[in-house]
Image (cartoon, rainbow, N blue to C red):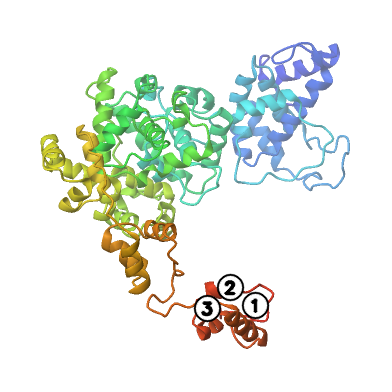
Amino acid sequence: MLALPQDHLALRTQYLIMESVRSGVADFGLYERAPVAEFLTDVRMLSKNLLTHPDQDELTWRLPTEIAAPYEQARALPHSKTSPTASRARPGFASPARAEITAAAATLAVEALSLATTGEAGARLAWLFAPSAAPAPRTAASKYQASELVLDIRREALRRLPAAITSGAGPRRTDRASKIPSLLWPAWTVALTPTHRHYKQTFRGLAHALAVLLILDGPGDSIARASRQLGSCQPADSVAELVHRLRRLPDWAAIDAALGQAMRYLDNHNCPIDYERRRHLDYNTLLLTEDWLALSRRAGHFPGDDRRPFTARRWLFERISGMPADQAPAAFTLTEPRQRNEVSGFSTHLTPELLREFDQYALTFLNKHGATGEPVTWTPPTAGLQVLQLPGTLHDRLPTQEIHHLIRRERLAPRTIARRFNVSVDAIRAVLHEHPAPLTLRQQRANGRLTWELAEQLSAQDLQRLHHDEQHSIKALAEKFLVPATVITDLLERHGVPVVLRQRSMPKIDREWLHREYVINRRPIPELAKAVGVSTSYLRRRARHWNIPVRDKGGAAHAPERLFGPAERQAAVKMLRTGNYSVYEVAHELGFTTTTLRRHTTKEERSHVPKRSPRPRPT
């Protein structure tokens, strides 16, 4: 028999169980006159989870000292209940073999059930329900199912920081949330997350989970509370699941060490950005459509279609606020999955000039909203991460120039480039966000850069003189400055110079000239149209209007004029029915085009034509 103090936790557990059995109801802690069977079922379920936990040393460490040693001794003794059973339900068989083991499990279970709220109980049992990579031992089958109360405790426990995480240990720092963005800095996220991961582990989800880990105070701290401090970018259960997935990674020790480095740096240094203030700025007027058009013109960038301004607003919102675009104001928040892909793919549209204009606009926006003196973005030093065996990639080790070449010259997608370097696509995007790829000369012309460069050469007065006074057409100006005509049109619109619409004078064409040149001299329509400066379709319409017979397109222009009469048709049908000639061969033999032959013969008459042999497929 074990002697215990009168107020010992094990004796109090025994008293609560016996009193509940005597009265038939449980009326303490999480129970309010609940049936005793419900209470005992919850004790049984929690005790089963405790005794089947993969790390029994953790259970021993949490027991009171007086019963921890007897529990260890009893657990080491052999007994007949070490092997599993195939029976569905054997009453009493699943109970522990010794009283010391029963007392240990019941003590911890009733201690959690005696707390005031399920949140407190979940915090107490966070270590128990935290997912583990080690499989739990097999146990005997049970007919009892977990109650709603136990499931609520489990849900609350999964939202708590398990004891196995050590990076959050240390003094509580209430100001740390103002130094951490809602989405961890991209350079750190890329380094701390695996290159190949589950599709549910999105880059922004992991970035938020890692940021949450930086402000947790220690074992049992609420993941949901930490997520709310950082703007609640994701549901608490999703964040908790990602946190536990990170803990189960083989590289968790290195990740934990990296997070510890970040915490020590933030606690000992000032952060130039107040992220708490940025999370609460008014972003409703951020980069309106007219601002985007002016910004893109200054950068010599093509403004894009109607969706591009919204994509640019979402991307800039993430860059300034440190939050995902899902948290943006309703005017430009994400509403469809494709919009997330467009924001992620915006890195390929960035150029050094466009990024410079974005940052200049962002500084003006921040100064306007009271964040004077803050940089647009900031990242803690990553030099200390180079000595750690992290699962991700340090993006400053990637060849930036080669990535630029693959993006612009070979026009490869970031995901293709990521596979080539065996890194995540987020690592390539992180490089492009900080070091955008410059456009080639051909891409500059297509992207509107030539308009910006020409605008530096020609002022509004120059355009007014060339286009109005000297009467140079848009086409003539385009040929003069070696740019497309659309560049001249865009430049005229930018400088506010009205376009002069000159009435085109059609050349005088009469029937005698067209008949002489086309019918007698056998000159083709395209040659005549080019000579007089009209289109071929216009000249054909005039010929038909004057009842001049028009030859088929593709026919010999200088061949003698022949009609496909009855004799020609009879000869063609005769050759087709032999089955030895193709349509092309018959037309060539008779001196007509295949179009003429098909027009004057029926499909049935051409049915005897030999079929084409299939082309050999390349091997």
Q: Residue at x 31, y 42 (%)?
A: 302
* Label 2, residues with CA under 10 Å away: few <14, some 14-19, many ≥20: some
Kindly identify which residue carries mark 3: 618
* Label 3, residues with CA under 10 Å away: few <14, some 14-19, many ≥20: few
- Tell me if residue 335 comes above or below residue 413 in the rendering: above
Quadrant location of residue 466? top left
- Tell me if residue 453 comes above or below residue 495 in the rendering: below
Circle 1/circle 2 CB separation < 8 Å: yes
| Mark 3 vs 2, N-terminal side | 2
Kindly identify which residue carries mark 1: 606
Instruction: Measure the alpha-carbon separation of dots 3 and 2.
Output: 32 Å
Circle 1/circle 3 CB separation < 8 Å: no
Q: Residue at x 38, y 56 (%)?
A: 538
Residue 144 position, x and y percent, is 82, 32
Residue 255 position, x and y percent, is 43, 42
Mark 1 or 3: in front is 1
Element under label 1? loop
* Label 1, residues with CA under 10 Å away: few <14, some 14-19, many ≥20: some
Mark 3 or 2: in front is 2
Q: Residue at x 49, y 37 (%)?
A: 205
